[in-house]
Image (tube, grey):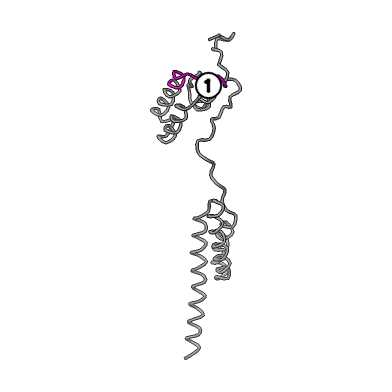
Amino acid sequence: MDVQPWGQPQQPHPGMRAAQTDRDRAVDVLKAAYAEGRLSAEEYSQRFDLASAARTYGELAQLTADLPAGPLGQPAPGVPQTFFPLAPPKPPTNPMAVASLVLGVLCLPTMGALGLPAVITGHIASHQLKQRRQQGEGLVIAALVLGWISVGGWVLLALLAILAGGH
């Protein structure tokens, strides 16, 4: 391996095929990072599988770029400093779920007037969460509970008024 003028070993091209010894070195770095608590067991397992299947220096460099010592010392030139995501990003929170919770919370100061809208938007949001695979289930549950309590309170009040008026 050639040495650059400042004493750092020249890094292989990221597209160059990696050998089994290169994959083994990357796994050693991952093992050390796991032992030091830098990686969780799940992340170590995911990266271990990816390192074992890596074909190029660039793939190995991505797996260890955020660790103190990668298989190449430092990421190869042109390789991004962050590794590719190991898990898909979290889906966004459904805006209708937020709206339904706001309506549910506003049931209290409006004496239950927004209970029915909270229930309706809560059910719409629940359907959208399943359809769009978005987050916000807890918001919807809270909105539905508040909305149904409010609607139930109005129904109970109406029943009491009917019973009191009939006597």
> From this viewpoint, which residue is outermost toward the left?
35
Q: How many marks?
A: 1
Kind of residue indicated by mark 1: Tyr
Q: Is residue 162 above or below residue 74?
A: below
- Give the x, y percent position of residue 35: 38, 28
Q: Residue at x 52, y 66 (%)?
A: 147
Magenta stretch?
Answer: 15-24
Q: Is residue 1 magenta?
A: no
Between 149 and 65, the one lying in front of the other is: 65
- Identify residue for label 1: 57
Q: Residue at image x 58%, y 27%?
A: 80
Instruction: Say what secondary structure mark 1 lies in.
Output: helix
Res 82 → quadrant: top right
The location of residue 160, given as percent across then percent down, is 48, 82
Please tell me which residue is depicted at 50% across the width and 76% down the height of the picture: 155
Q: Residues within 10 Å of mark 1 (few under 14, many from 20)?
A: many
- Give the image quarter of residue 131: bottom right
The image quarter containing residue 118 is bottom right
Residue 69 vs 105, above or below: the answer is above
Q: Nearer the viewer, residue 28 or 68?
A: 28
